[in-house]
Image: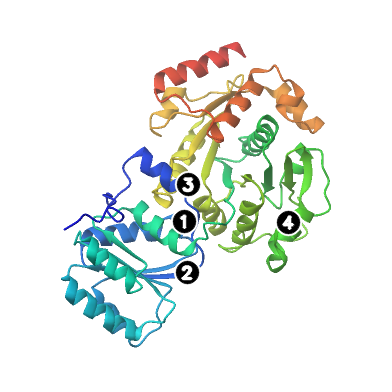
Amino acid sequence: MSEVAHSQRGGESLIDSGERRSELEQMRPLPRISIQAFCESDDLLEVMNSLADDRRMARVHFRTASGNIETASNMFASSPTPNLIILENRAPAAQLMDQLGDLAEVCDPTTKVVIVGHDNDVHLYRDLIRQGISEYILAPVSLTDMINVVSTIFVDPESEPLGRTIAFVGAKGGVGSSTIAHNCAWGISNLFSTEVILADMDLAFGTANINFDQDPPQGIAEAVYSPERLDDVFLDRLLAKCASHLSMLAAPSMLDRTYDFSTSTFEPLLEVVQRSAPLTVLDVPHQWTDWTQSVMKEVDDVIITATPDLANLRNTKNLLDTLIKLRPNDKTPRIILNQVGMPKRPEISLDDFCEPLEIEPTAIIPFDALLFGTASNSGRMIAETDAKAPTAETFSQLAHILTGRAEVKSKKKSGLSNLRSLLRRS
């Protein structure tokens, strides 16, 4: 029989190549829908379980079960059908059509159906499409295949592309994560004339307003506590202009109330900012709560800032291990080593810090109390304070890396050697 080229994707059950990972990273989060998958093979069940854990599925109510089309028909005879049913089929074509007829009798007319089949037959594919099946995919399928198919069905191709989100978090309090987040946001907006939103998520002790010498009357608190009002227009009213292409959602930095948030508190805000700007930088406080974990699971990139001591090494290792499990199909979080070379402070060497992490830092920023203190006290960024400082060049390189305009060298030794040279020049 003729080959079903449209559905022959040749996927693996796990993401194992940079090309597939890159393709996955470009996909939009799926809307709030319900999906039920029925799997006959362990391979597809493994892919479905990986799909359920993917951050792009955060808003999806997803269930998997071992079974076939007959199992689905029996289940939905007495329960409502979801928005999408994914069915694995090994039955002959004639039997498949009969079983789909039985399923149609118990399904809601708006329910979509995707079939994962093992019969590479273009005539079968055409018959299924004529019967109203949304897609027929030839096994084996990968996680990327499944998200592609669901996105094709439920995501409007005419919708505006979503902006990227980058979360900055400190491995320990006082390591300078907020300062680095603010300088990176300013650098990206300034260097590339790209609209950037900086959201200060530390509502009690946020410093973005101080670092940018701003005192806006409204900010992120109004967005968080009025989710029913939150849309593009309301967000625009809350943003404070920091530079030509940089806007800020400032934290109130007051203790007139406690800030105990639920897991989904910041979901409406993330949805709106992604529609409003090509890039949003999230300044996440050094906390481990339901909501911080949820935010870091959903963003496109996570940047961990640490200083070279034992507590930071332990915390960085814990954060890396946890985030890799939470984000199995995304790139590993980046590490920035800050305040390196502080006089009279014992430090862990770069090699000893990086070895247990099995990752090299994206950047190393030397300790410079005068430069950072002057910038902070004057409400200016590092590049505004001293454009010729090596640290200003480091932030420029970070802006290129975080926007995909440059990459860190992959060889650890040469990378650390270059960074040590930077430290010596400073």
Q: Which residue: 29% across, 70% down?
A: 128
Q: Position of residue 398 (x, y in %)?
A: 58, 29
Asked if the residue under mark 1 is in contact with the one under mark 4, i.e. CB atoms within 8 Å, the reply is no
Where is residue 303, by image quadrant?
top right
Q: Is residue 64 above or below residue 223?
A: below
**Mark 3: few/some/many CA within 10 Å (<14, 14-19, 20+):** few
Q: How far is disc 1 from disc 3 in space, using C-alphas?
A: 10 Å
374 on left or right of 350: right
What is the tally of numbered marks visible in this picture?
4
**Label of residue 33 in the image:** 2
Q: Does dot 2 land on a helix, a strand or a loop?
A: loop
**Residue placed under numbered mark 3 in the picture:** 26
Q: Which residue: 71% across, 48% down?
A: 205
The residue furthest bottom is 78
Residue type at mark 2 is: Ile
Q: How far is disc 2 from disc 3 in space, using C-alphas?
A: 20 Å
Q: Is residue 224 above or below residue 168?
A: below
Q: How far is disc 2 from disc 4 in space, using C-alphas?
A: 26 Å
Q: How far is disc 2 from disc 1 in space, using C-alphas?
A: 12 Å
Question: Is the image coloured rainbow, by chain, by secondary structure, or in one colour?
Answer: rainbow
Q: Earlier in the sequence, mark 2 or mark 1?
A: 2
Residue type at mark 4 is: Leu
Q: Does dot 3 land on a helix, a strand or a loop?
A: loop
Q: Position of residue 190 (x, y in %)?
A: 70, 32
**Residue closer to the observer: 179 or 133:** 133
Q: Which residue: 57% across, 16% down?
A: 423
Q: Which residue: 42% across, 45% down?
A: 23
264 on left or right of 48: right
**Residue closer to the observer: 302 or 346:** 302
Residue type at mark 1 is: Arg
Q: Is residue 229 above or below residue 346?
A: below
Residue type at mark 3 is: Gln
